[in-house]
Amino acid sequence: MNRRTFCRYLVVTGASAVTRIAFPADEQIFQLRYIVGSSMYGKLPLSEILPEIRKSGSRHIDIWPEHHANQREQIQAMGHERFADMLKQHQVELGMITRYDLGSFGLQDEMRLLQKFGGSVIISGSGGPKNLKGQALKIAVRTFVEKMKPHVEVAERTGITIGIENHANSLMDLPDAIKWFGEFSPSRFLGIALAPYHLPQEPGLIADLIEHLDHRLVHFYAWQHGLGCHKKLPKEQELMQLPGWGDLDFVPILAALKKINYARWTEVFMHPVPRGIPIMPTAGEVTGQINQARNYLEKCCQRI
């Protein structure tokens, strides 16, 4: 059975788990490792979200808090033991926690919680100052990295990697800031969570950043700008943030990931308007959109 026949088999049968099959060396393709963000499901209960994770091509979940979601608050309300039981029931693992609300200097307790559950990545933003350029930006990035050192020490002790997203209107807004951050980072436990949405929609530029970051790229959002995520749009326009819906060509981007042997998580991602609602009306429909985007990304991988 060749790869194309095998993939058609998956589509027809709806198989979610298969016996490992060895493909000929000339058919080996770059493969992404997926994680699912709870915010894609808005504020739906974990009891509805967790059964969808394996259906979404992953066994790991990225937990988000208010205001994009509220699964972190759900965990606190139900208790850690109950959450652990739910994970086990659905054969899902907690891989990441996203905590922009805590800021990059407020993650230490959350890292210890993540360690307790066997997770490995925590995501936050850099905050300000913003609108800097040139030498002033370089100095600010270096200063930020210096201030992160006590938190990196906790990251190293707990085995948790801190990912700083290149969020708009923040210190890490510009490509130069991202590059300098990668150069200044003192540890493999501190890196960039790269969101193409917040960058110029130029595949070559994004690919160059990926290659420049190399092992300092610790998370990748499969997320494009499309028509944005701040104004209410018809659903077919809002979904243009997802891979395969908008115009961004992911082939050069994935080729760059392959070049650096990227083996960390990829998260199919978008923001709905308003925040806190699922990207689609039901959990099953959310999963369907994630899988449609994954199918596009897998086709891109085949072209590398």
Image (tube, rainbow, N blue to C red):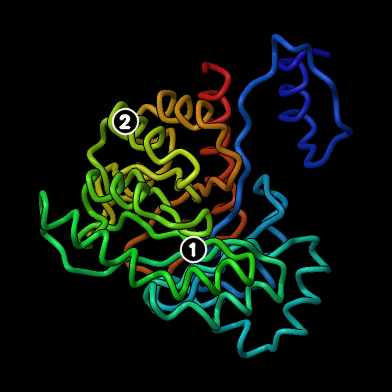
Rendered-image quadrant of the N terminus: top right
In the image, taking residue 214 as reference, residue 17 lies left or right, namely: right
Residue 92 image-quadrant placement: bottom right
Percent from the top left, x then y, of residue 221? 45, 48
Percent from the top left, x then y, of residue 145? 34, 63
Please give the residue where the numbered disc 1 appears in the rendered image: 162
In the image, taking residue 168 as reference, residue 148 lies left or right, namely: right
- Tag 2: amino acid: Asp
Distance CA(mark 1)–CA(mark 2): 30 Å
Please give the residue where the numbered disc 2 appears in the rendered image: 247
Crowd class of label 2 (few under 14; some 14 to 19; many from 20; radius 10 Å) = some
Crowd class of label 1 (few under 14; some 14 to 19; many from 20; radius 10 Å) = many
- Tag 1: amino acid: Ile
Between 108 and 303, the one nearer to me in the picture: 108
Q: Residue 238, relative to residue 79: is it above or below?
A: above
Q: Residue 228, relative to residue 146: is it above or below?
A: above
